């Protein structure tokens, strides 16, 4: 397996090569379920999901029809949300029951949370009673909360136990989670008080009390904590797993680092796409869905562009008097827009990582304004000379230089202040900063350049 | 404004509140090392690092002077690179030795890799002989390789051992890593053949052979594998730790998920900042450093903006004949630029997650072009009507509508093709796509609009 992964990764994604995809599609066309099984069986569920996402909608439908029964819970969990729903719709209740039975509770929650009620009911009916209770409980917590994303399967022991008692307990017939990295110590009222890593337990003598080998740092989360905060805390404190408690401080679940990593990854993706005005969406969305996702931001942009054009319209006579202004004005706006985007991206990222806070916001704004001033002066000199050489009017060079400095300073100010104010107002700065900042730099750019031209050139 | 931000962020910036920062700075001013100790001692190293990053350069210098001896390896590891260097420079060799002694080899590598040779030598001299060998070996691997980021401390046992033998070994006097989650089974030639989770080992009877409880899926990486690929594989396969082997397939280290999470986070940050034309940098960089980081991209943007202005200059006479064109032309360019940015961001992200590959690139391009066409038609109708109503010329509406459709289709095409081609050419698509795509949409936007106007309006 090693060799193969390494070789393939050079050209292709993980364990899925183009050749494999082609072979699978050939087998689909030949309705040859046995060959498909032989090709897909050695693959990790994540790779099978990746392959299903890679092929187009028609091939996907055919594959799933021919390969009936191949789908399992692990693969379903790995799939893009948009595809999951489609596949669940096509499964018979008995198949669906089979599929979800072996999943941890957090994976089941992840599968069912966005299904319609009928489908959700079907999946829940397929679960064993205790699992069902855990999943239903998790669904009562807010959408982006720790309670939604925790797994209810935890390994907990009384705080007074020894290493030996713990090992005997783990060796008894109890059902253990697939993966666990800590044993959580609880008091008689089920409140988590500390945890011990499995490594420390394994390397200690049987008679050692657990309480002596617990970790110094111990973070617990509340069921209603925002998962984004939880994911950042995992990254910040290098956590591997962390207990989740309810209002009574009772241990109700655990969040593990692999889930935190997925959450952090999703949040990054969201920030990156939102900064570019793409709400959500994946490569497997249809043309119509994608068009619909992109449209609102383009609509916002049209409004702001028209606003900027309105500023230009104020100076129609000035432009009629000197057409060179029309040639040069997009440069001032474009430089301001770029400087603003640089600043706001740094600010949005720093807000997300909690690096930009109340204690340093004024310092950061001052820095960005100074950076804008310095770069403004540098590019003003360059552009002033170009403007003069191009159109032979000294004053035109001076006007564009002055407009450039003004716009880059404004870009530094708006690029920091807008995201900070949006965050303060409870609006995701990644989503709305771009539109605001480029509107500011367009309007200021055109107004400064054309306004100065009106005063000094005509 | 600050006040409210403070309140809000007090809850969110991990263990560092603004009140705490203020108290620490007061103690610094009073040269009161005891109070600083009392305030910082209860904090996690990551929080202390966060606090050091939050205060401005002068306060930082004063804090580190007054709090001499407080710095340790953990805090240093958590700090921004730019600050780390500064602090190491100010430590005496003996202090430095004290600081690095307790770190895992990967953390030491991370500390020393960007130091100048003198400083590096000082740190290496401070290490014990075996650690020194491990660190020096790691430094021979390429910068962004698995070998650089692995820790050499691994827990490995012969493949024929039982659970009992393994536990006895772990309980013996050997030195174990701070954190480990698997025991790696090796053959007599030190080649890793499988691994068992500590959870499985703990829950199995002593006489069970390890070989019976190993994990189904087992990924190994090569010392020269790119860490970015490694991080994505961790996320894709939900790995917790993975062995790293050398050219002879011998086990030389292990990469753990907390490192992979940090790497993935850093890569995201890089992609996000590069997309916005910000090479690197953090909030604690100085004004001059920041100005220098932002300058190259603004320079590139100036060149492309001048190119676009050159296109406008071709049509100076057309604009002189109808100034409304100067008012409307930025709208066409701006809409194209936005649509192009949406598409290229989705493409850059999909390339990073290995979702956009050779097997679906044509499908994605077709989709993006169709999306551009649909949104182009929608906004062409809107803008056509606005253009007509604003300036009272039917043909002006038709011209801007046609230019809009052309530019949004081109945006869809360029937004996908440019990042894919850059990736193929070995250039980071996050870094260069933006400049190329907006140049294309600016040039095409101005050319289509003014060109059509020249033909149909004059």
Image: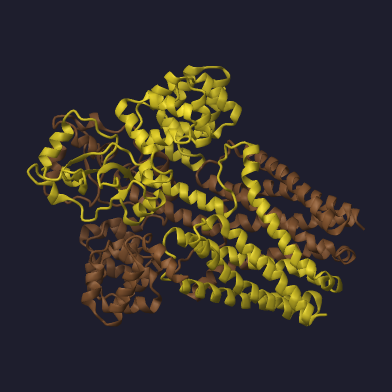
Chain colours: A yellow, B brown
Vertical position of residue A170 compared to residue B427: above or below: above
Residue drawn at (34%, 60%) of the image: B14
Vertical position of residue A26 compared to residue A109: above or below: above
- Residue A389 % position (x, y): 77, 77
Give the camera-side residue of B181 and A292. Answer: A292
Residue drawn at (72%, 81%) of the image: A398
- Residue A327 % position (x, y): 78, 68
Q: Residue furthest front?
A: A248
A440 lies left or right of A70: right
B367 lies left or right of A15: right
Q: Residue furthest left?
A: A207
Residue B138 found in image quarter: bottom left
- Residue B248 % position (x, y): 33, 43
Residue drawn at (57%, 57%) of the image: A432
Give the camera-side residue of A70 and B218. Answer: A70
Q: Quadrant of the C terminus of chain B?
A: bottom right
**Can residue B318 be seen in the rendering of this structure?**
yes
B419 lies left or right of B130: right
**Can residue B440 be seen in the rendering of this structure?**
no
Give the camera-side residue of A219 and A391. Answer: A219
Counting every numbered tag in the picture gives 0
Vertical position of residue B192 compared to residue A26: above or below: below
Give the camera-side residue of A145 and B94. Answer: A145
- Residue A417 % position (x, y): 53, 68
Residue drawn at (59%, 59%) of the image: A434
Residue A355 found in image quarter: bottom left
A206 lies left or right of B75: left
């Amino acid at each position: 397996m090693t060799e193969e992964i390494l070789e393939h990764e050079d050209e292709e994604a993980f364990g899925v090569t183009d050749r494999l995809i082609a072979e699978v599609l050939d087998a689909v066309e030949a309705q040859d379920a046995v060959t498909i099984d032989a090709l897909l069986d050695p693959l990790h569920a994540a790779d099978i999901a990746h392959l299903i996402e890679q092929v187009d909608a028609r091939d996907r439908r055919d594959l799933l029809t021919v390969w009936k029964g191949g789908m399992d819970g692990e693969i379903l969990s790995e799939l893009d949300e948009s595809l999951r729903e489609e596949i669940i719709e096509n499964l018979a209740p008995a198949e669906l029951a089979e599929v979800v039975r072996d999943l941890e509770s957090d994976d089941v929650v992840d599968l069912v949370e966005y299904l319609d009620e009928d489908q959700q009911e079907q999946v829940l009916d397929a679960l064993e009673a205790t699992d069902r209770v855990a999943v239903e409980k998790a669904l009562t917590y807010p959408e982006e909360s720790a309670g939604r994303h925790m797994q209810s399967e935890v390994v907990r022991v009384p705080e007074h136990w020894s290493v030996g008692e713990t090992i005997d307990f783990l060796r008894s017939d109890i059902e253990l989670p697939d993966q666990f990295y800590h044993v959580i110590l609880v008091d008689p009222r089920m409140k988590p008080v500390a945890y011990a890593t499995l490594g420390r337990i394994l390397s200690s003598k049987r008679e050692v009390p657990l309480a002596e080998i617990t970790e110094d740092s111990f973070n617990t989360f509340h069921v209603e904590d925002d998962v984004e905060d939880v994911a950042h805390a995992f990254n910040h404190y290098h956590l591997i797993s962390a207990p989740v408690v309810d209002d009574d401080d009772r241990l109700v679940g655990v969040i593990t680092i692999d889930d935190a990593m997925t959450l952090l990854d999703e949040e990054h993706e969201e920030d990156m796409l939102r900064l570019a005005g793409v709400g959500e969406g994946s490569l497997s969305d249809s043309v119509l869905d994608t068009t619909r996702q992109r449209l609102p931001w383009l609509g916002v942009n049209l409004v702001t562009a028209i606003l900027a054009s309105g500023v230009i319209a104020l100076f129609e006579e000035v432009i009629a008097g000197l057409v060179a202004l029309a040639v040069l004005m997009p440069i001032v706006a474009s430089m301001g827009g770029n400087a603003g985007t640089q600043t706001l991206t740094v600010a949005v990222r720093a807000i997300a990582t909690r690096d930009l806070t109340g204690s340093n916001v004024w310092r950061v704004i001052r820095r960005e304004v100074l950076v804008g001033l310095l770069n403004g002066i540098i590019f003003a000199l360059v552009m002033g000379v170009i403007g003069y050489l191009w159109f032979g009017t000294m004053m035109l060079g001076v006007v564009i230089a002055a407009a450039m400095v003004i716009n880059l300073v404004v870009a530094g100010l708006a690029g920091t202040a807008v995201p900070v104010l949006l965050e303060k107002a409870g609006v995701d700065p990644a989503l709305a900063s771009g539109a605001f900042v480029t509107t500011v730099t367009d309007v200021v750019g055109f107004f400064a350049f054309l306004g100065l031209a009106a005063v000094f050139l005509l």
